Amino acid sequence: MPVVTVQLWEGRTPEQKRKLMRALTEAMVEHAGTRPEGLHIVLQEIPKENWGSVSTLGGVDRTEP
């Protein structure tokens, strides 16, 4: 039972999530030999204010010292 976890910023529409799930499923079937009925996909939507990279918060330049 493979589990694919995708962490991304929140804000995708349900249709975008469905398309992503389909694409991930197709990729796992084609490239990893997974059966679709055995695959689990978890989308973890993270608020931008809880995500940091290169000393920035949510992709916005840091204003604090």
Image (cartoon, helix red, strand yellow):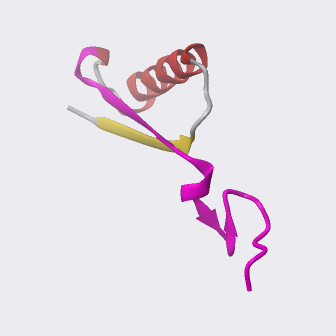
Q: Is residue 57 left or right of residue 8?
A: right
Q: Indicate whether residue 5 is drawn in magenta.
A: no
User: Residue 60 location, x and y as percent?
Assistant: 77, 60
Q: Is residue 40 left or right of residue 65?
A: left
Residue depicted at x 39% and y 22%: 29
- The quarter holding residue 32 reads top left
Residue depicted at x 73% and y 58%: 59
Q: Is residue 60 left or right of residue 29?
A: right
- The quarter holding residue 42 reads top left
Residue depicted at x 74% and y 86%: 65
In the orientation shown, which residue stands out farthest toward the bottom? 65
Query: Which image quarter is the N terminus in?
Result: top left
Residue depicted at x 47% and y 22%: 21
User: Residue 2 location, x and y as percent?
Assistant: 26, 35
- The magenta stretch spans which residues? 37-65
- The quarter holding residue 11 reads top right
Vertical arrangement, residue 5 with respect to residue 50, above or below: above
User: Residue 53 location, x and y as percent?
Assistant: 64, 67
Q: Indicate whether residue 54 is drawn in magenta.
A: yes
Vertical arrangement, residue 15 with respect to residue 7, above or below: above
Q: Is residue 34 left or right of residue 6?
A: left
Towards the viewer: 24 or 18 = 18
User: Residue 24 location, x and y as percent?
Assistant: 48, 27
In the orientation shown, which residue stands out farthest toward the left? 1
Towards the viewer: 54 or 58 = 58
